[in-house]
Image (cartoon, rainbow, N blue to C red):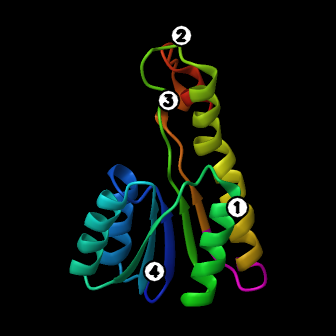
Amino acid sequence: MDIQGKLALVTGAGSGIGRACSIALSARGAEAVVLADLDPAGNAETARMVENGGTSSMAVTVDVSDAAALARLYSDVAHRLGPPDIVLNNAGIVSGAPAWPATSLARLLQVIDINLSAVVVGTRLAVEQMRGRGGTIVNMSSLAAFAPLYEDPVYAAT
């Protein structure tokens, strides 16, 4: 895929795979990378790394499980930079301690909201902005989807 001069939006960009993908987009010639994460310090560090690669960035603190906040993010990006050419829905969390089945229902619903619902909402928003002009959407998952994860089946399912 030709990334030269493209605008990318990456959720979960403040650490891990999202950070690595943001840096890789910069290294491959993206014009700008929008970094969306709930962790402002991690996001700022990713922004520094992306900009050290010669790519401009826009770090945004956003809770992707909040559909209205995600819609505002897409609207703001479109107004400030234009619609994204590449969207990487990467934000995700594990259920954490205590392990299944003792995990609270509130935490399980939070995992579903971030790992599944945010991907669905983000994909819909991206498609709306890409319709008629094209683009690329990448929805990340985990290898946990392909192997039993007895201590965290909700994470594996999402």
Which one is in front, 97 or 136?
A: 97
Where residue 109 sits, quadrant-wise, is top right
Which disc, if any, is residue 68?
1
Mark 1 crowd level (few <14, some 14–19, many ≥20, 10 Å Cα): few
Label 4 element class: loop
Mark 4 crowd level (few <14, some 14–19, many ≥20, 10 Å Cα): some
Q: Is residue 1 visible?
A: no
Counting residues from the N terminus, which is met first, the one under dot 1 or under dot 2?
1
Please tell me whether mark 1 or mark 3 is closer to you in this view: 1
> Are the residues at dot 1 and dot 4 in contact (C-beta closer than 8 Å)?
no
* Marks 4 and 2, how far apart at CA: 44 Å
Please tell me whether mark 4 or mark 2 is closer to you in this view: 2
Residue drawn 56% across the image and 28% down it: 107
Q: Name which residue type carries label 4.
A: Ile
Residue projecting furthest to the top:
101
Q: Which residues are magenta?
A: 130-136
Can you identify the residue that label 4 sits on? 3
Residue projecting furthest to the left:
52
